[in-house]
Amino acid sequence: MFALFGAFPLVYTAWVSLRAWDLTGDAGFVGLRNYSRLVGDPDFWNAMGNTLGLFVLSTVPQLCFALVIAGLLNRPIRALMMFRLGVLAPIVTSVAAVAIVFGQLYGRDTGLVNGLLGLVDIGPIDWQASKASSWVAVASMVNWRWTGYNALIYLAAIQSIPRDLYEAAQIDGAGAIRQFRAITVPLIRPALIFTVVMSTIGGMQLFTEPLLFGQGDISGGSLRQFQTIAMYMFEQSFQNFDYGYGSAIAWAIFLLTVLAGVANALIARRWRGGSTQ
């Protein structure tokens, strides 16, 4: 299964990236010409900057909120099952429905967000017009969809912690915040590492949310202000039909994801080493 759906597409994409392949067919081997073109392509670097910016705005708040929500859901509160089901709602909601709702929320003239900003004397914002505003809007979509998913992972990890540790901490006079920092966070470290790695992979391949935010505009706005690398790869491959160059971009995404994964692994290893000393 891995050879069929993992290794073969990866190797075949690498082979195509070394060729001049367009709608008319394979024009032959060109070596690293597609990659050298990639290095000097300002649109590619713009897409990479957008991808990294959206990754930071969506991943960091998402995981922080998920950790807080998991801590709250682990406490004895009324209608606990309802809250847990509510956390699941964004995950099972159709992506198209999410795009319609957020498109209405961030509408320039009649959007709810601009309406709320008007209450504090802030003028209407064209959320698609600039990098900063479009990044915030797209990141809010990603955060809304995936915070609950990560919260459930954290909740499962928290519930595996022996209650004796919390009882001992209470006897020693540790409050809820102190228990959370000294017991909960260190003991759910594997879950934290897992969610960071998965969020990194998802962030590097971000495609659906910015595409729907732009109402299907694969260029990510008039100035490419929120076009990600995945969108740029799709544009070159299936709109410009430059399959060789699109495959080179796909391999750039793969290498970027691998580098991010290795960085996460090194940080996690250092974290584990520091905690054992």
Image: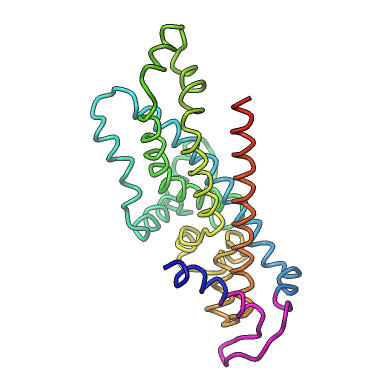
> Which residue is more in the foreground, 174 or 161?
161
Above or below 204: residue 188: above
**Colour scheme in the image?**
rainbow
Screen quadrant of the C terminus: top right
Tell me where the magenta segment starts and ends, as one range.
12-34
Above or below 214: residue 150: above
Q: Kindly indicate the quadrant of the structure image that contains residue 240.
A: bottom right
Q: Kindly indicate the quadrant of the structure image that contains residue 144.
A: top left
Above or below 135: residue 161: above
Q: Indicate left or right for 236 with 91 as reference.
A: right
Q: Residue at x 44, y 44 (%)?
A: 115
Q: Residue at x 60, y 90 (%)?
A: 26
> Which residue is more in the foreground, 147 or 263?
263
> Which residue is more in the foreground, 97 or 15?
15
Q: Residue at x 51, y 20 (%)?
A: 182
Percent across and percent down for residue 71 are 40, 28
Q: Indicate left or right for 97 with 240 as reference.
A: left
Percent across and percent down for residue 15 are 61, 79
Percent across and percent down for residue 151 are 40, 38
Q: Is residue 18 magenta?
A: yes
Q: Residue at x 57, y 74 (%)?
A: 11
Screen quadrant of the N terminus: bottom left
State how many labels appear.
0
> Which residue is more in the foreground, 209 or 77?
77
Percent across and percent down for residue 127 are 53, 53
